[in-house]
Amino acid sequence: MKLYTLIIFCSLVDKSIGISDWDVFATKTTYHWATGRTINPFFADVDYSFLKGNYECKAVHVNMVLRHGARWPTDSNMEHIEELANKIKENKTSSLFTELDNWANRYDLQNDGKLVQEGMVEQEFIGRNTWMRFQTLFEMYGNKYVKFVSSSKGRCIQSTQSFYNGFYKTMDNKPIFAYEKNNKLMRFYDDCDRYETDVEDNEENFKELRTFEKSRDFQNVIKSVEGRLGLDAGTLSVDDVYQIHNLCSYEKYIYNETTWCNLLTDEERQVMEYSSDLENYYESSYGHPFNAKIACPLLDNMLTTMEISGDKSRDFDSIPQDNANGYLAAKIYEGHSGTMLPLMTKLGLFNDSEPLKSSNREKMKNRKFRTSHITPFSSNIAFVVYSCDDKLSSNHDREMMVKLFVNELPVTIPACNNEVCTLQSVLDYFKDIRGDKCDLEKLCEIKPVSEASRHIPVTFLYLIVLLLISYISFK
Ligand SMILES: *[C@@H]1O[C@H](CO)[C@@H](O)[C@H](O)[C@H]1NC(C)=O
Ligand SMILES: *[C@@H]1O[C@H](CO)[C@@H](O)[C@H](O)[C@H]1NC(C)=O
Ligand SMILES: *[C@@H]1O[C@H](CO)[C@@H](O)[C@H](O)[C@H]1NC(C)=O
């Protein structure tokens, strides 16, 4: 009996001060927390081939987009952390949480947004897994026909380097590290006036988020933290509690320490997570129709590479000469959460049947749109093109197929509502955003909607009618 009481007591203590789930930090969640994978669970060639009816399918092209790995806070974050820690230290009246009294800020502005060790580990891990999952394909092509593209940000370049280190880990003759910096593809949301006015700076677009921040659920988190620390009501701002939530994550993945985690309960962390999801939903995903549109340069580039590399008439059993007409065995793109979310949205992934709102957190508890799971650090989306040959047909019928992987696991492709689709059906589904039809500059223009411009054609018509009438009457 005593033992039972002890066990119950211990588990209660655990719940209130510890942290039971680490996959609750929205876009500050590490890949390992999100997926639960720390050692490679994939065996060699696991995704390289499959059978479908008489068809034997073999991977011929891997097209993968990743978010950079776990990083340091950005410089503005670091400044806020310094102010927040000082404010708490100077005003705190509670004798609990003594570890905060001596907490030293170890964040160095020079590290602004750079990758941390954990981020390099994540990327190397995924690079290694990717080589293994398609081992036969990559062993055949060796160090040829793999291309890297990244945004110009240091964390994306570092991520590319780490992915490369994992990918070529066991190769004796590693190719020189070559990559293309391309912000048009990886940061399509930068310098887009229309995105700024309609989405980012449009307060109306964030009304659900602001309402949620004023809700009892959210305000109670602020009050509870203030209560625990013995701070006057009103000492902590909305941004301060977001920062406390983030600090729990940063401190754990950077220093393996949990000082800040103790300020929030599991339930309170879920409130913060929902609030972050609301922000991402309206800033980068289904919450605003423009968000999916701006992903077109990247998706168009991915589909073009898949189309060229998946050319049905190619002999996939022999290594092409240097002039491979654009064939690539793999194209690896490194970007940001602002890259991943619009791309996922354009693909139609993780689309809940109703929008996230300030009022439906409880109902959306099992929502698909949970950034802690879909866009943690190093999250990734990969289309894989397969060449499928009919083993029974005498004229060697061939069909090009695709699969879609999110965070290395297969998902249903919304474009054809199946796990395996023909390449052509995916290309057809997105035909309206290909080539000339994806003009980012035009998309990003702010449309002139002045009254005068709308009336010009009408005035012009009147003029013609008047001229006609005078012409007829003069005749
Ligand atoms: C808390 O401490 C800061 C100094 O960091 C001080 O400016 C402020 O007045 C104090 N009180 C409150 C309620 O913020
Ligand atoms: C992190 O800290 C915990 C306990 O404080 C310890 O058991 C664990 O081994 C540490 N992990 C690493 C990677 O150092
Ligand atoms: C997302 O789902 C909603 C509701 O089911 C639907 O109306 C909308 O068209 C979907 N959006 C996309 C981009 O697939």
Image (spheres, rainbow, N blue to C red):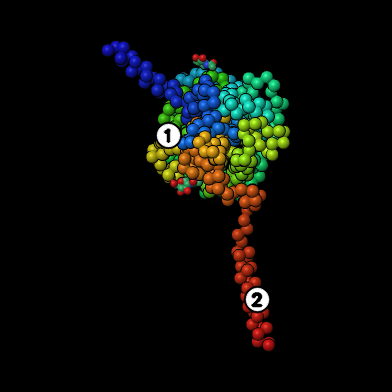
The residue lying toward the viewer, choosing from 263 and 340, is: 340
In the depicted structure, whether residue 147 falls above or below residue 426: above
Give the mark nearer the N terminus: 2 vs 1: 1
Q: CA distance from mark 2 to mark 1?
A: 67 Å
Residue shown at the point (54%, 29%) measured from the top left: 48
Helix, strand or loop at label 2? It is: helix
Amino acid at dot 2 = Ile
Q: x and y percent of residue 173 in the render?
A: 69, 21
- Seen at 40% across and 41% down, the residue is 360
x and y, in percent, of residue 172 in the image: 68, 19
Asked whether mark 1 and ligand 1 are closer than 8 Å, the reply comes as: no
Left or right side of 241 for 365: left
Element type where label 1 sits in the image:
helix
Residue assigned mark 1: 220
Dividing the picture into quadrants, the one containing residue 124 is: top right
In the picture, the quarter occupied by the N terminus is: top left
Residue 248 rendering spot, x and y as whole percentages = 51, 25
Task: Judge whether residue 230 can be spotted in this image.
Answer: no
Say which of 15 and 416 sits in front.
Answer: 416
Q: Which residue is mark 2?
A: 464
| Number of numbered discs on residues | 2
| Residue occupying image coordinates x 60% and y 22% | 117
Q: Residue at x 65, y 72 (%)?
A: 460
The answer to whether the residues at label 2 and label 1 have Cβ atoms under 8 Å apart is no
Question: With respect to residue 341, does 39 lie above or below?
Answer: above
